[in-house]
Amino acid sequence: MDSKLFDMSQIDFAKLRDEFAKKVKRKAAALQDIRDVVEKKLAQMLAQNPQRMDYYKKYQEIIADYNREKDRVTTEETFARLVDFTKSLDAEQKRAAEEGLSQDEYALFQMLFKDTISKADRERLKLASRDLLTALRTHLKPMPNWTKNTQTQADVKMFILDNLYTSLPRPPFSEEDTESLAGRVYDFVWQRSAAGAMFVGAA
């Protein structure tokens, strides 16, 4: 996948709407255009952060509703729903910046987040996410092919666990929570690294 972010601000939705409004024949093509935009954006966002799977499910629901009855009204409604949906995707990508985090830091933060944590612990969790990412980048730099070796895999798994044991606030995080979260973070880091994503590069 291209390491550059796919920027929806470059998409001319006004032009798409104009083309959509012109004639019925063009509506299906315009709808496909916006589906292509959404699918490309979703693929990028899910690769960055698997916690965003709800957005993919929402997109599937919109398309499933459309496929049940492909008449003119349904096509128009689906187009409008997809335009609104792209706005929600754009807003989601801006949340990392609003939290003062990079996309990778935000992905880790969402993985570690608990609804029940206090405001102070929330800030500690942001710091833990930043520190973990920095530590991982340093640790993984001399091991570009660590995903292909059982010894380096075990090393990275233990490194993540040790880091979380020292950085997660207790309470509310228990030892069981820490072990479970370490497994999720490891899976995420492994997938990003195995896919050749720029996890260990600049945010």
Image: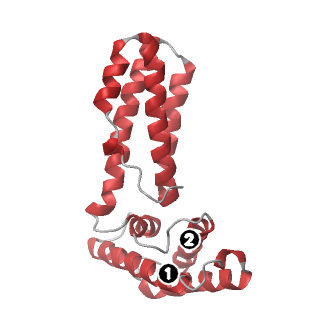
Which quadrant of the figure contains the C terminus? bottom left
> Which residue is labeled 1 in the image?
136
Q: Which mark is residue 85?
A: none
Foreground residue among 119 and 94? 94
Residue that appears at 53% across and 86% down = 139
Question: Label 2 amino acid?
Answer: Val
* Image-quadrant location for residue 151: bottom right
Residue that appears at 53% across and 72% down = 181
Residue 62 visible at all: yes
Question: Label 1 amino acid?
Answer: Leu
Foreground residue among 76 and 161? 76
Foreground residue among 38 and 95? 38
Q: In this view, does 152 lie to the left or right of 104?
A: right
Label 1 Cα crowd, 10 Å radius (few <14 / some 14-19 / many 20+): some
Residue 148 locus on image (x, y percent): 71, 75
> Which residue is labeled 2 in the image?
189
Residue 167 locus on image (x, y percent): 42, 84
| Tag count | 2
Q: Earlier in the sequence, mark 2 or mark 1?
A: 1
Element at label 1: helix
Q: Are marks 2 and 1 in contact (CB under 8 Å)?
A: yes
Q: Distance between the residues labelled 2 and 1?
A: 9 Å
Residue that appears at 43% across and 18% down = 27
